[in-house]
Amino acid sequence: MNIVTGAGLVVAAFASTAADGTEQPDAQPVRLNVARAGDMLKLTVVGNASVPVAARYTLHVSSDVTSGGNRSTQSGEVRLEPGKTVTLISIAVGNARDGNWLAVLDVQPSTGAAYRIEKRTAD
């Protein structure tokens, strides 16, 4: 399991080539992007792969902003095709600078290991 954190960090998906010359699946074909605009926070789950791959994903978001707490869970399945970037989930969190928030993305690709990406207030 990989835990990836960092302000505005985008986890890039890369394909590798095996010794026999065949292309291997992306290590992380589904990733979590975070963008801030004033006191709003926009969380976007994006899929992009260099080889065809299917994946299941679940995004858990929680916040304890001063105007009230929030919990959201969204999940789905996707079949990614090379050269096509797709937005899978887009969530806006209001008053994000007034409290703490946590976003956890769990992904189970059809090939390769399952992984987790966590981003939080301090990132």
Image (cartoon, helix red, strand yellow):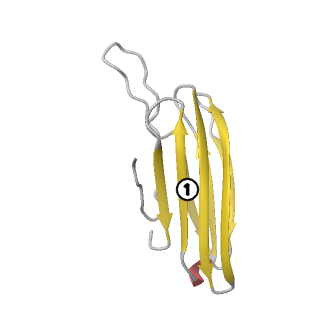
Report whether 76 appears left or right of 34. right
The answer to whether residue 37 is above or below residue 59 is: below
* Percent of width and height locating residue 95: 65, 80
Can you say which quadrant of the picture contains the C terminus?
Answer: bottom left
Query: Picture quarter containing residue 43?
Result: bottom right
* Percent of width and height locating residue 112: 44, 32
* Percent of width and height locating residue 31: 53, 48
SS label for mark 1: strand
Q: Residue furthest top?
A: 20
The answer to whether residue 39 is above or below residue 36 is: below
Query: In percent of the image, x 53 and y 26: which residue is there?
Result: 51
Within 10 angstroms of label 1, few (less than 14), some, or many (20 or more) residues? some
Query: In percent of the image, x 41 and y 16: which residue is there?
Result: 22
Q: Amino acid at mark 1?
A: Asn
Please state which of residues 117 and 84 is positioned toward the viewer in this rendering: 117
The answer to whether residue 26 is above or below residue 72 is: above
Query: In percent of the image, x 41 and y 55: which residue is there?
Result: 4
Which residue in the protein does label 1 denote?
33
* Percent of width and height locating residue 13: 47, 40
